[in-house]
Each structure stands twice: as structure tokens, then as C-alpha cells.
Image (spheres, rainbow, N blue to C red):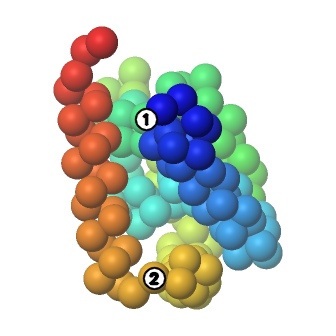
Amino acid sequence: MLALGRQLCFAVYSAAHAFNRSYKPLLDPHGLTYPQYLVMLSLWQGDGKTVKALGDELGLDSGTLSPLLRRLEQNGYILRARDRSDERQVLATLTERGRDLKREAAGIQRGIGEATGCSLETLSALTAELRELAARMNATEI
């Protein structure tokens, strides 16, 4: 029962590492890390998000997110500025370079799709199951 190979947590952990290894050569030409890519995905979905909203969506605290955003800004993908309507908030917005990268992201997705060896239907089902699992676990207090 306690064998490492039988643990769901280890299977998820191993899969996460495999994803990171697969994404690295696809993201390196753009100067992106995997967490930075997640930020870009979020901003492509809806530009002009507060740092707090990004952190909530990605499950990252400000101590982790701020350096990511700083590097994205240094690379010219985003701009950070105080929200004019609420000076306490910092907004992250895409630059033209950041918006242009979205077109190239299709190649990144294709590469990951090929690396999985799964059909689109299988990937969609697996994604849905993992989201449901995360939701159940987040709703459960141990």
C-alpha cells in the first residue's frame, strides 16, 4: 500500500516534472520559464489583471509572483503600473511583444501535445479529471 509507485501523489509529481522538462526546450527560445508562461497564458486570456488576481488564479503568493513579473517586464513582455482607479493595486498588462508571443504559443501547445502522445479527447478528459480532483481536495480540510 505504501509503495512509492502506487502513490497518486508521486504519479502527479512525476508527471509535473515530465511536463516541465518537455516545456523547457519550447520556452527557452522565448526566454520564458514555465511559471512565466503560465502568467502569459493568463494575460492572453484577459489582459490587464492585478497582481493579486494573477496570484489568486495561479495559486502563487506575491513573494513568488513579483520576481516572475519583474523578469517578464525586463524581457519586454509585460508592463506593471499602479491602477489609476486604486493606487494600492498593481496592474500587469501585455506589451506588443507580449501580444505577439501569443501567435507563437500555438507551436508550444503543439509541441506539448506531441510530447504527451495523447489524443485531444484524452487530454481534455484528463484535464477535467485533474481539475475536479484539485477542487475536491481544496474543498476538503484534513
Q: Is residue 26 above or below residue 65?
A: below
Q: Is residue 118 left or right of residue 100?
A: left
Whether residue 80 is visible here, answered yes or no, is no
Among numbered discs 1 and 2, the one appearing first in the sequence:
1
Mark 2 Cα shell of 10 Å, populated few (<14), some (14-19), many (≥20): few
Mark 1 Cα shell of 10 Å, populated few (<14), some (14-19), many (≥20): few
Please tell me which residue lies in front, 21 or 63. 21
Q: Residue at x 71, y 75 (%)?
A: 26
Q: Is residue 1 above or below residue 122?
A: above
Q: Is residue 88 left or right of residue 81?
A: left
Query: Which residue occupies the extreme front position in the image?
Result: 1
Quarter-wise, where is residue 88 in the image?
A: top left
Query: Which residue occupies the extreme top position in the image?
Result: 142
Whether residue 122 is visible here, answered yes or no, is yes
Callout 1 secondary element: loop
Q: Residue 19: horizontal and vertical position, in percent? A: 61, 62
Callout 2 secondary element: loop
Please tell me which residue lies in front, 61 or 128. 128
Q: Is residue 105 left or right of residue 52?
A: right
Q: Residue at x 43, y 35 (%)?
A: 59
Amino acid at the residue labelled 1: Gly
Please tell me which residue lies in front, 58 or 88. 58
Q: Is residue 12 above or below residue 46?
A: above
Q: Residue 127: horizontal and vertical position, in percent? A: 33, 63
Which label sits on residue 118? 2
Q: CA distance from mark 1 to mark 2?
A: 27 Å
Q: Residue at x 52, y 55 (%)?
A: 38
Query: Count the marks: how many?
Result: 2
Q: Residue 33: horizontal and vertical position, in percent? A: 70, 56
Residue under label 1? 59
Q: Residue at x 48, y 32 (%)?
A: 1
Amino acid at the residue labelled 2: Cys
